[in-house]
Amino acid sequence: MVSVKEVAAHAGVSVGTVSNVLNRPDQVKAETVERVRAAIDALGYVPNAAARQLRAGRSRSLALLVLDVGNPFFTDVARGAEARAAREGMSVFLANSDDSTEREGLHLDVFEQQRVGGVLISPAGDDLARLAQMRAHGIPAVLVDREAGESGFSSVAVDDVAGGTLAARHLLETGRRRLAFVGGPLRIRQVADRFAGASAAVAQEPAATLRLCGADEMSLDEGKRVGEALAPLIREGRIDGIVAANDLLAIGIQRALLFADDPVRVPEDVALVGYDDIAYAASAVVPISSIRQPSALIGATAVELVLEAGEGRPARSVVFAPELVVRESSASAPA
């Protein structure tokens, strides 16, 4: 690799002058800048970003750590974050905790060692002590898809209680009364809030009931497993509406019901509403109603908040309102 010394020798200037051309060109005479840049082009010199990072104490990269990189919702969040960071000349690299606090901790250790410019994180748990430690070391963090509460961190999220309420209320308005909520584990704050919202909506309807159907993870395969377990209850008339805590679960549930040996019809036998409004929801065999979150905007806002935190500005929380998107999976119940 070509070194700064070689560039300096080729241009006939000092190493310090080359450094100034790379970092503070306004302090160098125009003809010297031109000569140094010509030497850089001739030799194919590539500046050492790692060395610059060590000198500056922070990189031009942000880290985005999500619960499930396989969930298209987080992919859309990442796109929004990347687009906003690019406007600042920064990059974003994506990491996956797989909803594991241990794995999250390992990633955070690496982020600190790399002196990232900031961390955007959807936490796997409630203990934010590691983030507080990183903040004390000069690396700001922002909570993504999670409200900060009294933690002192900035955050960007959607009102998941309101989202759960929207989903359940919609099913009640279409004539369903025996609802099931599928999601979990409930230690995930977003899932617990969505269930709380659905419960609140059902509590306002005296004739309605809500059954909690736990899920071990928020995946397509888990949705299929739960769907197979719910099918007999739907055939017996004990469930006529389902709120799924995300669209992957909803898609898996629908597949299990439609393609069973004794198929369950959607929405004739059971109505279905998902959450996140990922692209696959609209493309399902029966297009799935869903609660839309502004995923790209969440990512972009998280970058803005972490930049503010890096400048020492006060923490703030941004909460977006969810939106119900109605499709065929929750058409009105037959008379």
Image (cartoon, rainbow, N blue to C red):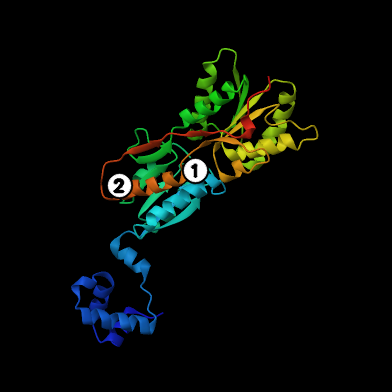
Which residue bears the numbered disc 2?
A: 309
Q: Secondary structure at mark 1?
A: helix
Q: Is residue 238 visible?
A: yes
Which residue is rendered at x = 75% and y = 24% of the image?
235
Q: Is residue 112 visible?
A: no
Mark 1, Cα crowd under 10 Å, few <14 / some 14-19 / many 20+, is some
Closest to the camera, between mark 2 and mark 1, is 2
Q: Nearer the viewer, residue 183 or 160?
A: 160
Looking at the picture, which amino acid does disc 1 mark?
A: Thr
Amino acid type for the residue under numbered disc 2: Ala
Q: Measured along the vertical axis of the image, is residue 282 above or below residue 37?
A: above
Q: Residue 233 appears at what percent x and percent y?
A: 72, 24
The total number of labels drawn is 2
Residue found at x 26% / y 50% = 311
- Secondary structure of the residue carrying tag 2 is helix
Mark 2 or mark 1: which comes first in sequence?
A: 1
Q: Which mark is residue 101?
A: 1
User: In which quadrant is the N terminus drawn?
Assistant: bottom left
Left/right placement of residue 237 relative to residue 26 reads right
Q: Position of residue 206 (x, y in %)?
A: 56, 12
Q: Return the residue nearer the eye: 150 or 178.
A: 178
Q: Position of residue 215 (x, y in %)?
A: 61, 34
The Cα–Cα distance between marks 2 and 1, rounded to whole angstroms, is: 24 Å
Q: Position of residue 294 (x, y in %)?
A: 46, 41
